Image (cartoon, helix red, strand yellow):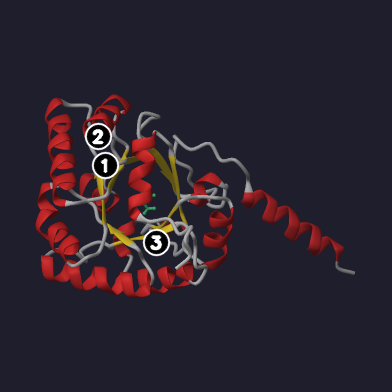
């Protein structure tokens, strides 16, 4: 094995050293390779795939077969980065189903799996970890539940929500999760969780107080210009660059 390969333990150690964890999503071979060559230590094949690559209106349409297909493509880049994958909607309803589907993603090349939820998914989470597959939690705004919740709402503003987040995060850490993604959690609550937990928090739209940050790469590089979350400042406008290059080539034809 490549001695520089980034492991789950290496990601956890970054928290102990106070080193920020930069994480990004990728869904295919070239993007995974580019992110890896840019020194990103954690690359995640998120089910945001459904929205930014496959053209679905939300993440609930993504299937296991689609996740496997894209995880295989990303894994062919053989990244030094730790490579994760999302368990898609309704693929982890029971411990048995969660283990079977986590094994499928691991066989496709995922080095950890992530699923959305807290106390309500603890049995599947414990089963995944007992099967030897590293697990990353995901709390706060849960995109797989956005349809039933009527949108993408910030979490942790109210006292009961704040308390539930603390309890769910502690429960996931005790169950053996190696990290937790905090999505759209109010920055003070995200910071409180980060200080309280022994494992890294990786924020998305949750303020600067997390141990790391993750973004959907398409948002960061302006590759999905039809919608950009308000907390992302694109660093390059790939959509405009592509259109300009295509127009220049078209106009050059004689
Ligand atoms: O699906 C996804 O891209 C995610 C994020 C946290 C980036 O889960």
Quarter in which the N terminus is drawn? bottom left
Give the mark, 1 or 3, whose residue is nearer the N terminus. Answer: 3
From the viewer's perspective, is 120 left or right of 189?
A: left
Tell me what residue is drawn at x 28 percent, y 62 percent.
87
CA separation, marks 1 and 3?
28 Å
Counting from the top left corner in percent of width and height, residue 114 is at: 28, 56
Give the mark, 2 or 3, whose residue is nearer the N terminus. Answer: 3
Q: Which mark is residue 155?
A: 2
Q: Which mark is residue 50?
A: 3
Crowd tier of the residue under label 3, counting other residues whose Cα lies within 10 Å: few below 14, some 14–19, many 20 or above: many
Tell me what residue is drawn at x 18 percent, y 69 percent.
99
Label 3: state its secondary structure. Answer: helix
Q: Are marks 1 and 3 in contact (CB under 8 Å)?
A: no
The residue labelled by disc 1 is 199
Quarter in which the C terminus is drawn? bottom right
Q: Nearer the viewer, residue 108 or 57?
A: 108
Give the mark, 1 or 2, whose residue is nearer the N terminus. Answer: 2
Can you see residue 115? yes
From the viewer's perspective, is 9 left or right of 49?
A: left
């Amino acid at each position: 094995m490549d001695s520089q390969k980034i492991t789950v333990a290496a990601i956890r150690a970054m928290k102990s050293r106070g080193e920020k964890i930069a994480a990004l999503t990728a869904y295919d071979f070239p993007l995974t390779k580019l992110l890896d060559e840019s020194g990103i230590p954690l690359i995640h094949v998120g089910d945001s795939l459904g929205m930014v690559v496959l053209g679905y209106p939300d993440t609930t349409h993504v299937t296991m077969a689609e996740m496997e297909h894209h995880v295989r493509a990303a894994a062919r880049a053989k990244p030094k980065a730790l490579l994760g994958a999302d368990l898609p909607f309704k693929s982890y309803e029971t411990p048995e189903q969660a283990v079977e589907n986590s094994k499928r993603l691991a066989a496709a090349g995922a080095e950890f799996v992530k699923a959305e939820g807290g106390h309500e998914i603890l049995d599947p989470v414990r089963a995944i970890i007992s099967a030897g597959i590293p697990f990353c939690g995901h709390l706060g705004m849960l995109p797989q539940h956005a349809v039933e919740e009527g949108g993408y709402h910030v979490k942790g503003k109210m006292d009961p929500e704040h308390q539930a987040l603390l309890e769910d995060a502690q429960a996931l850490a005790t169950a053996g999760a190696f990290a937790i993604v905090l999505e759209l959690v109010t920055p003070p609550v995200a910071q409180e969780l980060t200080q309280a937990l022994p494992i890294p928090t990786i924020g998305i739209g949750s303020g600067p107080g997390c141990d790391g940050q993750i973004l959907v790469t398409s948002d960061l590089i302006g590759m999905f210009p039809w919608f950009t979350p308000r907390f992302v400042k694109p660093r390059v406008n790939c959509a405009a660059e592509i259109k300009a290059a295509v127009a220049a080539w078209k106009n050059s034809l004689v």
